[in-house]
Amino acid sequence: MKYERIKGTQDIYGDEVNYWYFVEENARAVANLYGYEEIRTPIIEPTELFVRGVGEETDIVQKEMYTFTDKGGRSITLRPEGTAPTVRAFIENSMINDGLPQRFFYIGPMFRYERPQAGRLRQFHQFGVELIGSAHASADLEVLLIAKHFLDRIGVRDYVVHLNSIGCPKCRPTYKQKLKEYYESHVDQLCDDCKRRLNTNVLRLLDCKIDAQLAENAPKSFKFLCDDCRSHYEELKQKLVELNFAFVEDGTLVRGLDYYTKTVFEIRHKELGAQNTILAGGRYDGLFSELGGQAIPALGFASGIERLVLTLKSQGTSVPRRERCFAYVASLGLKASIEAFKIAEELRRKGVPVINEVNDRKLTTQLKHANKIGAKVAIILGDEELSRSIVHVKLLESFTQIEVSLDVVVDYVLELFRSRS
């Protein structure tokens, strides 16, 4: 019988893992620099959370969610994004009692049923941040600065920040009406999906890749903002300019989720083709009340880790290789094997990565394996060495070998580990 991974998923192993460690560790480091704490929400959530939060007419809810009925008859969905679960957790656990604002980040898998292609999988992973409890443009600025700091830190080059404001429930109806009038005058040029969206969710027409040329010439949302939204947007832009934060104003930028208000942004990279958005987000001031909580302003972003890895590779960016094994302990004989594990455990407790021989193999075979897994040092002992209370330490890169007393070998190898370049 042949088993294969499910379409739209991938196995991550070998050198590929180094890229994932690099991105995830830097994501955590940057989040910590800005005072964000990690939140981990379940992979499964009630389906209604996303119908209410993300929007019933969005492509995510209409086409892309993995939804099933569990044994208790409840409709369950594999989470397609991280914001709604974070808001649900905030409300359910009464986190508001800890005061506002609060800052969270998450790293984990999401699930959407889409046509798999480079940078778009059915199980994908995101790093995201959420700043909860501030309506001020300074909060928008902070989130954008985190995004830039993160991308700069991992070495992404030549990205472009697209920025827009899509208004609020007060001013957005006027814009949506203007947008509908524009598209109705071009209805014969619309794809079938957009003809449906024209009467259900007209903002989604601006997201369509098929009718992209029509979107470029569509009315710009920032021209229809109310006084409050305009003031917020202008303040944010002014602060970005004064901080030399480069951005492109994109008046037709909307996001594919209904909860967004006011500020929206995307960061794109030219190397990725059609799937060129590597980080995106915005403000969602109405989501808390929509999900049954108090009205709390908030915003955040999410970044696809798969796309970031593709970007780094396309740029030729090398990342540090995680040291799997510094010392390999080769042993011959039962007594030597027991002593080998003692040495290895002492070294591990001092922070040295060590691999023990766990098969009964010839010494030459053990040393070949040590070289293959990248060990720098081989510690060799057998019954003859034990009888003399010594071991042999072989430096595998220089092919030199010395005899070391058994009672100091741990300190000797530890010093080699600390002094390596």
Image (tube, rainbow, N blue to C red):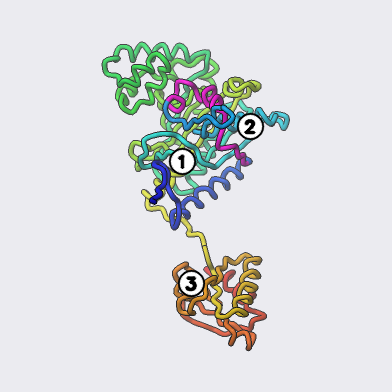
Disc 3 vs disc 1: Cβ atoms closer than 8 Å?
no
- Res 124 label: 1
Please, what secondary structure does the residue beneath circle 3 have? helix
How crowded pointer 2 is (Cα within 10 Å; few <14, some 14-19, many 20+) is rated as some
The span from disc 3 to disc 2 (Cα, nearest Å) is 47 Å
Name which of mark 2 and mark 1 comes first in the sequence.
2
Vertical comparison of 16 with 339: above or below: above
Query: Which residue type carries mark 2?
Result: Ala
Decide which of 282, 306 is in the foreground and name it: 306
Residue situated furthest left in the rendering: 188
| x, y percent for residue 150 | 51, 44
Residue 48 is inside the magenta segment = yes
Query: Which residue type carries mark 3?
Result: Ala
Bounds of the magenta span? 38-62
Q: Is residue 242 among what the camera can see?
A: no
Disc 3 vs disc 2: Cβ atoms closer than 8 Å?
no
How crowded pointer 1 is (Cα within 10 Å; few <14, some 14-19, many 20+) is rated as many
Question: In this rendering, would 385 be left or right of 268?
Answer: right
Q: Mark 2 points at which residue?
A: 89
- Residue 85: quarter of image: top right
| x, y percent for residue 131 | 60, 32
Q: Residue at x 61, y 71 (%)?
A: 344
Name which of mark 3 and mark 1 comes first in the sequence.
1
| x, y percent for residue 362 | 48, 79
- Residue 70: quarter of image: top right
| x, y percent for residue 142 | 56, 35
The span from disc 2 to disc 1 (Cα, nearest Å) is 21 Å
Q: Mark 3 points at which residue?
A: 370
Please, what secondary structure does the residue beneath circle 1 have? strand
